[in-house]
Amino acid sequence: MAADRRRLLLLPCFSRILRRWSLLRFSSNMRSELAILLVAAISVVPLGGVSAAGPSRGFSASGVLTVQSRPQSDPPAVSPPQKGDAPNGTAPKQETPKADPPKRGARPGPGVGSQAGAAAKKPADKPGLAVAQPRSAAERDQALANLYAHLATAEDEAQAKTIAASIEALWATPGSDTISYLMQRANGALHGKNVELAIQLYDRAVALAPDYAEAWSQRAGAHFIAKDYERAMGDVRRTLALDANHFRALDGLFHILHETGRKKEALKVGRQLLEVHPFNEGTRQRVDELARELEGRGI
């Protein structure tokens, strides 16, 4: 019905077009063919509206075929690509952050470079391996007390040596630059076999720091080397009065007593030494021999 109505509306226009074409110098056959083609074209082309395929076509009131352009919507705004965006709308690849290269000479930590992410097991710290520098005499005394307790219960000789080394490191911290300088000079003189100069320097250290046990102990060793056993004995006893667990002083006293023939006292001191330092080098064998000599049995 709608198509028939359109054709009826076009008939007046078509009549006017034919009248105008009749004025042209065409043959009758040509005019008939043109008319047939025009009618066929009009019956196919829809009038008005906008097709989905393209622009809309129609006739104006004067019968002239008009073509109206299809209104186009603005294309969607596309934001310019940002730096680092991947093309074609794909998500940029995530780069794995790289760790800073280790400094030259530094050891890698646990698990460095491992992609599995397994936590490395931290080995248990052995007693006496790391001792903080004491900031006061009280801290130093507390650190020594803790180390002496570990030394007395050491499981083997290697562990005992490690703890003993930490104790000796604390002994060598007088807390005074002047005393430290005097002790270094005196030890150097003693190692250079200048015993007399060493004793003079130890004398100055003892005079300036009478509560510093290591100064007394080192001077006792110098007197022992000089075979001045009485003075060596006096310095050792002073050392033990300041630090009863000073195993070097106990070892020195054991030797002095043994050398001077006071074997029973030596045996007692030797056993005391083994309680403080069970793995003190050579002590157990000497004490065992002395016990057999005096008591007829070993320790």
Image: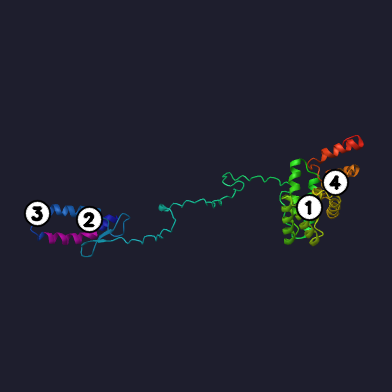
Queried whether the magenta region covers residue 16, the answer comes back as yes
Queried whether the magenta region covers residue 150, the answer comes back as no
Mark carried by residue 56? none
Q: Quadrant of the N terminus?
A: bottom left
Amino acid type, label 1: Gln
Q: Which residue, given by chain and number where applicable, does mark 1 sit on? A: 218
In whole angstroms, how far apart are the C-alphas of marks 4 and 2?
Answer: 138 Å
Q: Which residue, given by chain and number where applicable, does mark 2 sit on? A: 42
Q: Which callout, 1 or 4, points at the residue further toward the start of the chain?
A: 1
In whole angstroms, how far apart are the C-alphas of marks 1 and 4?
Answer: 14 Å
Amino acid type, label 4: Ile
Residue lying at the far bottom of the rendered structure = 61
Q: Is residue 150 above or below residue 59?
A: above
Apparent side of residue 285 relative to residue 125 in the rendered image (left or right): right
Q: Which residue, given by chain and number where applicable, does mark 3 sit on? A: 28
Q: Which residues are magenta?
A: 8-21
In whole angstroms, how far apart are the C-alphas of marks 3 and 2?
Answer: 21 Å
In whole angstroms, how far apart are the C-alphas of marks 4 and 3?
Answer: 156 Å
Q: Which callout, 3 or 2, points at the residue further toward the start of the chain?
A: 3
Of residues 74 and 283, the one drawn nearer to the viewer in this rendering: 283
Visual colour scheme: rainbow
Q: Which residue, given by chain and number where applicable, does mark 4 sit on? A: 256
Of residues 189 and 10, the one drawn nearer to the viewer in this rendering: 189
Of residues 201 and 281, the one drawn nearer to the viewer in this rendering: 201
